[in-house]
């Protein structure tokens, strides 16, 4: 069956060159290259994780019908599996593909603004809210139950695949993307005899949600959704829960999540147990 692909790249010269190379190779096959007006079977992102985040947001209306493929032109990323010299494997994978995919959870973000209008979005990595000036005060609800009053710089809520991004920098746990969960991490909470928050990060399942109720008078917030920031956002309430939609990636080959984590954050080493080299999990299914 004929396959359609959409190619998205960042503007770095290496990525643009690779994009041209890929287009030439694809044109010699029965795969069709489409533009943004046609639903593609595959979206190929060329660049880094940030490029894939941009591709996701540009084409999220196709999320239920498309599979993403990330080719990296920098370093191995969390959403980019393929290297610049593997174009032939990618093309052959697409041609032979029978719909194999791996899917990851997305975060549904529902914001209520001070004029009571609403704004909804999906996040692949995380949502965060912070105050511009002074302490942000925010009531945190889990489902409909009041949990705590947070005072501090801000709050981040991430997906499992986003757990290695901003969440990790804030001291959150790295979560295996097969788990259907979201994680709340604090940014510099005020904790003393008067004000108290849980302080550790919190992980909740699919059927629970967070509501952040911004209770101070300030309506000048900075909101981030993945690689996008919105300053001066007059938001007063945000509801965050796992979305019904999931993002799908083509899975022509298997890469072990913990190998990726190790490769990104630890680097090569040798384990003493059985003299195992690191990265050996990729050979296990
Ligand atoms: P960026 O400033 O280039 O991102 C910072 C770094 O985070 C880059 O190295 C990026 O990889 C990497 N990254 C992105 N998503 C990741 C993930 N799921 N797991 C591990 N690393 C990830 O900005 P960007 O490329 O537009 O990416 C936006 C994301 O960066 C945000 O969603 C947030 O998760 C992350 N971020 C991290 C920090 C931090 O660690 N202190 C601060 C702000 C934002 P590439 O180089 O491949 O793009
Ligand atoms: Mn980036």
Image (spheres, rainbow, N blue to C red):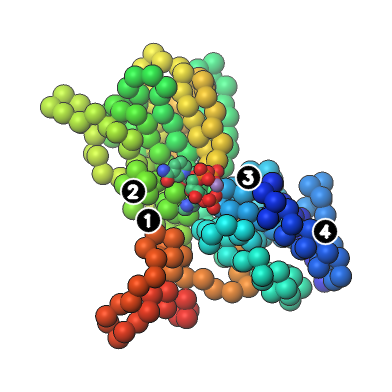
Instruction: Say whether disc 1 or disc 3 marks the residue closer to the N-terminus.
Output: 3
Dot 4: within a 10 Å radius of its alpha carbon, few (fewer than 14), some, or many (20 or more) residues? some
Q: Measure how far apart labels 2 and 3 are at the Cα level.
A: 24 Å
Can you identify the residue that label 2 sits on?
Answer: 172
Query: Tag 3's secondary structure?
Result: helix
Instruction: Say whether disc 4 or disc 3 marks the residue closer to the N-terminus.
Output: 4
Residue at (37% x, 31% y) in the render: 154
Mark 2 and mark 3 in contact? Answer it, CB < 8 Å.
no
The front one of 8 and 18 is 18
Mark 1 and mark 2 in contact? Answer it, CB < 8 Å.
yes
Horizontal placement of 156 versus 246: left or right? left
Look at the picture and state if 157 lies above or below 70.
above
Can you identify the residue that label 1 sits on?
Answer: 174
Q: Position of residue 263 (x, y in %)?
A: 44, 65
Horizontal placement of 256 versus 61: left or right? left
Q: Is mark 3 within 8 Å of ligand 1?
A: yes
Can you identify the residue that label 4 sits on?
Answer: 33
Query: Tag 2's secondary structure?
Result: loop
Q: Measure how far apart labels 4 and 3 are at the Cα level.
A: 19 Å
Q: Quadrant of residue 216?
A: top left
Dot 1: within a 10 Å radius of its alpha carbon, few (fewer than 14), some, or many (20 or more) residues? some
Query: Tag 4's secondary structure?
Result: strand
Q: Position of residue 242 (x, y in %)?
A: 48, 47
């Amino acid at each position: 069956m004929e396959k359609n692909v959409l190619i998205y790249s960042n503007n770095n010269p290496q990525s643009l060159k690779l994009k041209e190379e890929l287009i030439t190779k694809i044109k010699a096959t029965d795969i069709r290259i489409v533009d943004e007006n046609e639903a593609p079977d595959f979206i190929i992102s060329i660049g880094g994780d940030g490029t894939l985040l941009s591709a996701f947001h540009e084409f999220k209306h196709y999320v239920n019908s498309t599979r993403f493929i990330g080719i990296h032109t920098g370093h191995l990323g969390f959403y980019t599996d393929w290297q610049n010299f593997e174009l032939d494997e990618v093309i052959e994978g697409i041609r032979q593909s029978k719909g194999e995919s791996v899917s990851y959870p997305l975060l549904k973000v529902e914001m209520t603004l001070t004029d009571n209008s609403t704004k909804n979005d999906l996040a692949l990595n995380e949502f965060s809210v912070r105050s511009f000036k002074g302490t942000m005060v925010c009531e945190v609800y889990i489902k409909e139950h009041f949990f705590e009053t947070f005072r501090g710089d801000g709050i981040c809520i991430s997906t499992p695949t986003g757990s290695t991004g901003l969440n990790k920098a804030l001291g959150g746990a790295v979560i295996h993307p097969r788990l259907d969960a979201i994680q709340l991490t604090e940014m510099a909470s005020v904790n003393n005899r008067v004000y108290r928050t849980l302080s550790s990060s919190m992980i909740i399942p699919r059927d629970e949600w967070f509501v952040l109720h911004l209770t101070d008078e300030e309506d000048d917030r900075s909101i981030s959704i993945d690689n996008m920031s919105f300053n001066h956002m007059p938001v007063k309430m945000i509801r965050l829960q796992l979305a019904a939609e999931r993002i799908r990636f083509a899975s022509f080959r298997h890469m072990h999540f913990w190998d990726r984590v190790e490769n990104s954050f630890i680097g090569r080493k040798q384990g003493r147990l059985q003299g195992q080299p690191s990265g050996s999990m990729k050979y296990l299914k």
